[in-house]
Image (tube, rainbow, N blue to C red):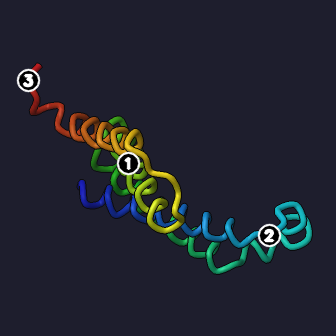
Amino acid sequence: MVLAIIVSNTFVVISKLCLKKKATEIKDLNNDFLMNPLGILFSPWVLTAMVCFAISLFLSIYIYTKLEVSKVFPISFGFGFAVLAISSYYIFNEKFTYINFIGVLVIFIGSYLVLHKESLPS
């Protein structure tokens, strides 16, 4: 089931990266949105983002039939944040400082604890 969570969130990350890519292509935000909203909506980047998000949506529904949302959400959020931060650093040259690294590490540790809380001593 962890693999399904990872795959689902990978599709979410891909959708966010596609939207960011489209955002970098927009030169004049007000003019593009007002004059060509359908051009933005039907651009390959936005369409890819929508397909990836839809796949993630269906995978999430499947996951929620097997696991508690209180377990899935923290893991999903943590994984998504970490992978998106690292991907943005490499793809868009966004900042990724030591503080970001420590934050990502804490998120992974927290996700592990949430997932395995039954096997930990009380």
Q: Secondary structure at mark 2?
A: loop
Query: What's the distance in space between the residues labelled 3 and 1, CA to CA?
Result: 24 Å
Residue, x 11% and y 19% (percent of image)? 122
The amino acid type of the residue labelled 1 equals: Ser
Tell me the quadrant of the picture where the N terminus can be found: bottom left
Count neighbours of disc 1 (C-alpha within 10 A) and say few if under 14, some if 14 to 19, many if 20 or more. Answer: many
Image position, residue 30 (x, y; %): 88, 60
Q: Is residue 48 above or below residue 102?
A: below
Of the two numbered discs 3 and 2 on the same chain, state the one appearing first in sequence: 2
Extreme-front residue of the structure: 98
Q: Quadrant of residue 16?
A: bottom right
Nearer the observer: mark 3 or 2; the answer is 2
Secondary structure at badge 3 equals loop
Check residue 121 in the rendering and tell me which mark sits there, or answer none.
3
In space, the residues marked 3 and 2 are separated at their CA atoms by 55 Å
Instruction: Identify the residue position indicated by label 2 in the image.
Output: 27
| Label at residue 76 | 1
Name the residue nearer the viewer: 24 or 72: 24
**How many numbered markers are drawn?**
3
Q: Tell me which amino acid carries mark 2.
A: Lys
Circle 2 crowding by C-alpha within 10 Å: few under 14, some 14–19, many from 20: few
